Image (spheres, helix red, strand yellow):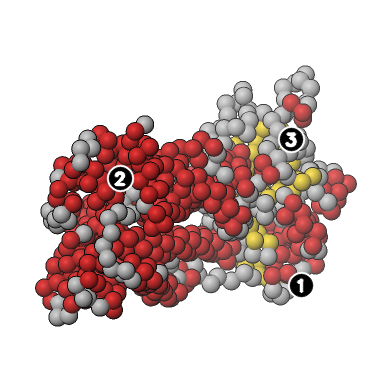
Amino acid sequence: MTSVNLTLRLLRAGGARGLLGAGLMAAAVALSTALLLAAAAANVAFDHRADRETWRHPGTPAASGDAVAIEAASVDYVRGKQINVIDLAALDRPAGAARNHQALPTPPGMPRFPKPGEVWMSPALARLAASLPANQLANRFGSASASPDAQRTTRAHPTGLLGQAALVHDGELVAVVGWASTDPAMWAPKQTAVERSSDPTPIASFQEGEPSAIAGTYKVFTVIATILLGVPLLVFGGAAARLTVARRDQRLAALRLVGATPGQVVAMTVTESVLTALGGAVAGVLLYLAMIPGLAQIRIEGGTWAFSDLWVGFPIVLATVVAVALLVGVSAIVGLRRVVVSPLGVARRETPPGLRMVRLLAFAAAIVAFLVASKVVLGWGSTGKAVIIALLGLGFWTINLVGPWVVALIGRLTAAAARRPAGLLAGRRLVDDPRSAWRTVSGVALTGFVAGFTVLLSPAASVVADSPIEQLSAAVPAQQVQAVSAEARQRLRDVPGAALQPPDERGGDGANDSGDAGHDRLVMVTVTVHGGAERVDQARTALAGLVPGRHFTSPADADRSGMQVLLDIRTGALTVLIASFLIGTVSAGISGVSSVLDRRQTFALLRLAGTPLRVLDAARRRETLVPLVVMGGGSLLTGVVMAAPFALANPLEPTALVTLAATVVGGLAAVVGASELSRPLLRAVTTNPSPRPD
């Protein structure tokens, strides 16, 4: 308790500038905590979305004795938007068994299992169906086995609306259609090459499903985004413990020289750091809660998020607060080695030993390991992805490891080449404390890596071909082509501008297009529709159900799915980049002010020696800009190199180059602007240059 009381007294005795230092540390911790929770929320949110989708995609088929229903999933389109269609049918019960739909498994978001002919729609799909003519959307749903009266009823109005538990997001277009188990639509293979489609599968419940492949892809992208954001946050959080470290080390060294034990010094440091960090972490939790409404508006996969998606839960919040406090405490303890071992050296401001070149070797080894692994382990499935992600994080983190070493090298070169006092002061400062100088520019330097990495992961829109929308096709078994063509002509009589094309003998699309899979040879039946999207959707509706298990789709439909993924990648990259800029700017501002507070006695002595204020200000600016240009450019180049194995095959999006240029210019402006915030403080601490004891 003596150490704790002494720490609190010294903190209060530090005056306004002492409290300013503690406030800077708390602010840094608050921002780190809020953004760490936001990064965790992104992973939790995509997990929630994937979980809500699992009921639509059965995993292993249920045993014949356990199966009670058949489920299939397919994808349809309207006005360029994707509709997820889930087909359900109850299996016939053995002779003598009563058929009770209430005993069937209940799909999520529905009060009961659908009966044949029923159509349940998501609220967004129901609104869209009500806003469009029935012959363009609503009439395409319904079971062919239902009675004519039931068809007219379900096609005019949905049987009911799906609840939130059935939807990935509120704006999703989903239709659940009930069928008879004898209907051909429940036995025909689907277009399984299309994302979120699955063949008819016997099921015993809706609890045995699995996420779609596209959901897993989004989760991998989220983990990568977390690493790109998490490394700067951890660096920033660790640096928070070192803010105003020189002033604190001087104070603790003085206490060691008058008899304080190493244990007391450690206890005082931990108390000051952890108490301040806990206050900042609690403020960060409140900031995270305030950020959720804004984060919920980020549209991914065409939809926004619910509060429950982005709320990580009290256990994760508590774990984050404790982890941040421990990180700050451990970082503070690690920095005490010189105070404990050589308090006299600290008190005399002796230059610490130089950093070793092994940091550069570790950085190079991490980059080489990542590049090699990107060529070797990509075919290892989930294990390969985990290795790649781990090496990506390691390579990114080693930039922080090599940063101080490069800053020290820059300092020696700057001092050797100096022709003016400002250059000499800046170079000597970088050599004297490269870690502190690196903390000032680390945020924006690491943002350069994020920009360089993401710029190559934004392929141009030309990657997705500009395919026509007026050609609708479906794969049909060869022996049914004549009958399907005749029926198609009959249905298209009322669709102006629609014409049936000669059958395409080259085969269809999907996983079951070859006889090798045990299915008949498939032939493409194609319809050309002129007159725009309205006529195309009218033709889709007229042809609905013509080929059991398959919808008539255009080449542009698949392109839209690919375009959605590209848009989401750009949205995620832009979000991470903005967050990185925020970290870098705040880090530069806080570290710049902290650096002036740390060296106020040095500045006072230089002023007493006759150094003009403009020279001190020029030196302060130069010791920030020179490392920033070198390390920012090096980090950006490192990001480009590490992203190259995944992006060289794609043409570069022109706007990505604009983003890259904006990153460079914005990074420089952010650091310069943030560092200029310390200029009034520099003037204030040198107004009365008489040195005072802390």
- Residue 113: image tag: 3
* Residue 254: percent from left, percent from top: 22, 46
* Residue 82: percent from left, percent from top: 63, 57
Q: Quadrant of residue 452?
A: bottom left
Residue at the spot 60% in from the left edge and 42% down from the top edge: 52
Instruction: Work out whether residue 504 or residue 22 is closer to the camera in this orientation and state it.
Output: 22
Residue at the spot 63% in from the left edge and 49% down from the top edge: 306
Under mark 2, the amino acid is Ser
CB within 8 Å, label 3 to label 1: no
- Secondary structure beneath disc 1? loop
- Residue 331: image tag: 2
Above-or-below relation of 18 to 268: below
Q: Quadrant of the C terminus?
A: bottom left
Which circle's residue, 1 or 2, is located before the other in the chain? 2
The residue that label 1 is drawn on is 496
Residue at the spot 34% in from the left edge and 33% down from the top edge: 2
- Secondary structure beneath disc 3? loop
Q: CA distance from mark 2 to mark 3?
A: 57 Å
* Residue 289: percent from left, percent from top: 57, 49
Under mark 1, the amino acid is Pro
